[in-house]
Image (cartoon, rainbow, N blue to C red):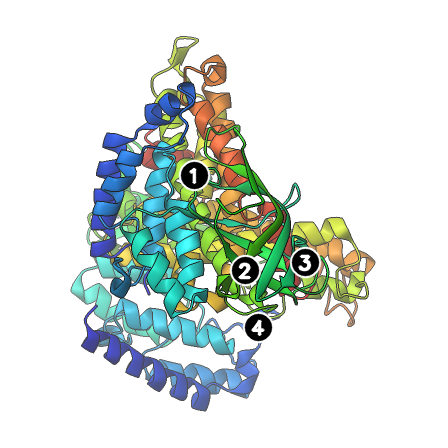
Amino acid sequence: MTDSETADLEQFRSETRAWLEANCPPEMRKPATSDADVFWGGRNTRFSSEPQRIWFERMRDRGWTVPDWPREYGGGGLSAAEHKVLRAEMAKIGARPPLSSFGIWMLGPALLKYGNEAQKQEHLPKIAAGLIRWCQGYSEPNAGSDLASLQTRAESDGDDFVITGSKIWTSYANYADWIFCLVRTDSTAKKHDGISFILFDMTSKGVTTKPILLISGYSPFCETFFDGVRVPKSHVVGTVNRGWDVAKYLLQHERAMISGMGERGVGRPLGQIAADSVGADAQGRLDDAMLRGRIATFDVDEAALAACAERAVDLAKAGQAHPAFSSAMKYYGTELNKRRYEILMSAGGVDALEWESERSRQGARPRAWLRTKANSIEGGTSEVMLGIVAKRILDLPGA
Amino acid sequence: MALVLTEEQSMLRDSARGLISDKAPVPHLRQLRDSKDPTGFSKEFWHSFAEMGFAGLLVPEEFGGSGLGFVEAGVVMEEIGRTLMPSPFLATSVVAASALNRGGNAAQKSEYLPKISNGSLLATLAIDEGAKHRPLQTSLQAVRAGNGFRLSGAKALVVDGHVADLFIVAARTAGSAGEREGLTLFLVNPKAKGVAIERTIMVDAHNAARIELANVEVNADSVLGEIDQGAGLLDGVLDIGRGAVASEMVGLSEEVFGRTVEYLKSRKQFGKLIGEFQALQHRAAELYVDIEITRAAVMKALQALDTDVAKATSAVAVAKARAGTTATRAVQEGVQMHGGMGMTDQFDIGFFMKRARVCEELFGDANYHTEQLARARGY
């Protein structure tokens, strides 16, 4: 980096800091504690508070719901270095993401790479502005880890495909406006070769959703059924029958997103949270030496993972990233988040077992603990991730 | 700062790797061990190291050094870790040079730093006294005597202690073991009256010594830094050493892992390459992830040291703790996956296991640094 680039970046940092200080409401500088604190956008969305609305609109108007997307598609047009500065400055004041969306994390990157111009113009600005909420139609009852064996069929009929089949684990399908979906367009080809990636409106005739009650007591996932849903062929992203390329590319982004879940490095140290319930000795040391050791080891690993996540972004920017590296991050990040919640449950003791009381915020902790168990399953299981690392990065033989 | 090497740093890595892998591959260590080499490293090679500017890598240019930073020192340490080359680089060029540069007065710097840069002076920090690294437990006594001090006590794990031209000794001028106040660093001539040096042949065949000081007299000019206030200087110097050893462990881990993966791709049992077995694939993949995460943590720590040594403590604790557990895992899996061959002295893998064990103890093990992080975070 030249001196003048460094100076420009420092100026961007001080301007960004000042702008965030002036524009991020204090209420939006605390970690989200429930799903109501997360703004997902979409046709039927409502803001849960006035500060949430203000924060979202101010960020949207700067293109900072998607800071690194091109301006022409509603993004902020920031360079990778500027984006890193913005993230760091937001983290410094604990600013929440103004908009959470599968459109931002998953579909957007895939459209930017594989979409045609009309598709980009149509969909990206609506994602950036939080107008359309997307869901992901990937897994099926008989296609989980073996995703490419999916059976939902898209039959050609003139200018349309007619889609029949079902999906499962469709996150928030019951709230979503549109779906990006993997369908089989050639049932005679090898399993990876007959798949297409297609977009359609969830209000289309023939689409129904049914929430699945999980062990957490919540229903973030749905079964989704398609009964002769008619979709124009122009809604296919990329080439017909080459949807697996798009699917894999999107999965890399999904895995990067999942590996970043959890409130890493935000708020009070885990050891202090534990001290609230476990107690501490005169020197402030947690009154449970074994738990203290587990937490400290967790903290070491968490800090190291944060460095690795930062490095992964820098490597990608430098063109040195291995395309399968997101699988490595996904594996470690999700296992670490599960460890975090095992520690929180252990630290909370009896208090962490209450499921319905006001005091426990309707069992927020045990429900979140149970939710984390899906982290190492969704988006590819830990075992699938390790297999990808073994084969694609380490080049180990077989299967 | 991006967590990737710059172009210049990559070039430095390539030249260090070229030199070290060519002149000092693992058989170099084996040869030094088997011949019971009295020096414990190659003097000739150390001079080429100095000529390339590595000996004075951290020394400012005004004292004949290269004036580079800790990321660059880490780059060299990593390459040393790959071949396990015994070298004064850690004790002299990283730890002692940093102590002199950070704590020395003008006279001390101009006397010693140019000699470190040209490879003519070997120096080392004498800190540990007990079985474990506990810097504040220092109890080697320094009492005022006339215009100077008289030092008495013992030190262990003094790297390159039997060949050093200069000891930097942590001593207690006030207070008692466990206290931060009252620590002072002294420059001590190993040939001074009352110094006894015992070279200790270690498991890893790298240099170390036990030294004993019995009423060793030093003058007032031998104080490095401030009297009684040496803890701050020591913290920084030790953190620099920790970052360097963590880098060595990353290089060591990656090398042993690379060799192990190659073995998985060539060894056949049950009519298959053993790398086809999922039980081994998953363990190899987990280890890969561990090494990548540790590499990032170590790079983060080195950058933090370059930014501000005094504020790098937590990042260094994370790095050294991670490097310790990762290297331990890497060498254990290395031996296990090499099967019976891994147990033989003829195979190099065992050398990595032995060196990793020593690196783990150097400047505090994973438990020590994990404990430091817990304290820093207030639990």
Against A73, is B324 above or below? above
Q: CA distance from mark 4 to mark 3?
A: 17 Å
Q: Tell me whether circle 1 and circle 2 mark residues in contact (CB < 8 Å).
A: no
Which quadrant of the structure image shows residue A68?
bottom left
Chain under disc 1: B
Residue B331 visible in image = yes
Chain under disc 3: A
Disc 1 crowd, CA 10 A, few/some/many (<14, 14-19, 20+): many
Q: CA distance from mark 2 to mark 3?
A: 55 Å
Q: CA distance from mark 4 to mark 1?
A: 56 Å
Disc 4 crowd, CA 10 A, few/some/many (<14, 14-19, 20+): some
Q: Secondary structure at mark 3?
A: helix
Residue at 39% x, 33% y: name it: B84
Disc 2 crowd, CA 10 A, few/some/many (<14, 14-19, 20+): many
Tell me the residue that label 4 is attached to: A31
Q: Tell me whether circle 4 and circle 1 mark residues in contact (CB < 8 Å).
A: no
Disc 3 crowd, CA 10 A, few/some/many (<14, 14-19, 20+): some
Disc sitting over residue B163 in the figure: 1
Chain under disc 2: B
Tell me the residue that label 2 is attached to: B185
Tell me the residue that label 3 is attached to: A367
- In this rendering, which labeled residue sits more in front, label 2 or label 4? 2
Residue B377 lies, in percent from the top left, at 63, 65
Q: Secondary structure at mark 4?
A: loop
Residue placed most toward the observer, A28 or A19: A19
Residue placed most toward the observer, A247 or A153: A247
- In this rendering, which labeled residue sits more in front, label 1 or label 3? 1
Residue B117 lies, in percent from the top left, at 29, 53
